[in-house]
Image (spheres, rainbow, N blue to C red):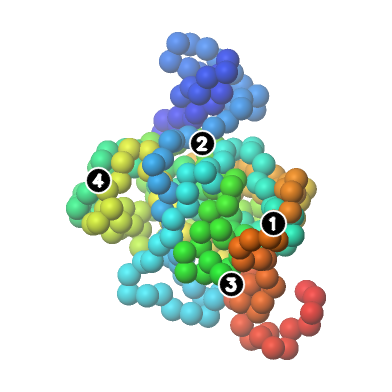
Amino acid sequence: MPEYRRILLDGAATQVRGEGDELVSADGRVVGADDAVHLPPCVPSKVVAVHLNHRSRVEEFMTSLPPAPTYFHKPTSALNAHRGAVVRPERCKYLNYEGEVAIVIGRTARNISPGEAGEYIAGYTIGNDYGLHDFRDTDAGSMLRVKGSDTLCPLGPGLVTDWDFRGKRLRTYVNGSLVQDGSTDEMEWDMHYLVADIARTITLYPGDVLLSGTPANSRPVQPGDVVEVEVEALGRLTNHIVSGPAPIRDDCGAQPTESEEVISTTFGGDWEFRGIRGPKR
């Protein structure tokens, strides 16, 4: 399966092809994959993410799925890349990882059927749909700051074409320890369905990204942690967490909170602890 990456090569954004441990540009320049400065493997006009899709995540939250998927938007200013730093702003505590498969659109898509959707997909990459749950009390509907803050959408390392999404394992590691372990087979709505559903009313352009949902056990990470998402035959997306250089301003807007909603969501929907949880976990 061919893999294509975007890197900074001699100061310019360049598409390269993966050949073993090396990345090769169209003009023959070669750089080691471990030495490259990576960029997101595509340039989307929009990033759309599904809320709940993996059955293990639904069970973890002790809820049920709606009749059809629901979505939120991550602005392109949130884009990040393989080995990039994910910033947790000062005064925020609850930054959660969510390992996912990302669908990358290859042809303009509008009003297509699920059976046709595969023809409009360029390939797949790995995404980590980070969430800053400190803002969940005010942004639960839009998820704008929760999921759309700067650096919270790493994609990569590469775009893999001719990848069959069925029966693929998805794992997330924090500092080398396995924290999420799921499969694409536990998705209620598959990749083709998601593309067709969005494209009923929203035109999808080449490079656009759809994040397909995460399995159970999304949890908070801390500055200094290394988070890796591994998807079978797509590779491994690696990022590290850093503390933001400036605190969230307190002279405007909603402030970070630590309500039961915030904490229960952050730690996996443990609603049975509402009202009896101690002040610290």
Residue 62: image location, x then y, percent: 53, 80
**26 relative position to 276: left or right:** left
The quadrant the N terminus occupies is: top left
**175 relative position to 107: left or right:** right
Viewer-side label of 1, 3: 1
Q: In which quarter of the image is residue 270?
A: bottom right
Question: Which residue is disc 1 drawn over?
Answer: 249
Question: Which residue is disc 4 drawn over?
Answer: 109
Q: Is mark 2 on a helix, strand or loop?
A: loop
Q: How far apart are marks 1 and 3 (CA)?
A: 17 Å
Q: Residue at x 39, y 42 (%)?
A: 45
Viewer-side label of 2, 3: 3
Q: Eyeballing the image, is 145 above or below 14?
A: below
**Residues at circles 2 and 4 in contact by the CB criterion of under 8 Å:** no
Viewer-side label of 2, 1: 1
Amino acid carrying label 1: it is: Arg
Q: Which of marks 2 and 4 is nearer the N terminus?
A: 2
CA neighbours of label 2 inside 10 A, class few (<14), some (14 to 19), many (20+): many
Q: Which of marks 1 and 3 is nearer the N terminus?
A: 3
Nearer to me, 72 or 122? 72
Amino acid carrying label 4: it is: Ala
Q: Which residue is drawn at 33% across and 38% down?
A: 206
CA neighbours of label 3 inside 10 A, class few (<14), some (14 to 19), many (20+): some
Viewer-side label of 4, 3: 3
**Residues at circles 2 and 1 in contact by the CB criterion of under 8 Å:** no
Q: Which residue is drawn at 61% across and 77% down?
A: 261
* Residue at the far front in the pictured view: 251
Q: Which of marks 2 and 1 is nearer the N terminus?
A: 2
Q: Which residue is drawn at 69% across and 73% down?
A: 258
Q: Which mark is residue 137?
A: 3
Q: How far apart are marks 2 and 4 (CA)?
A: 21 Å
Question: Which residue is disc 2 drawn over?
Answer: 40
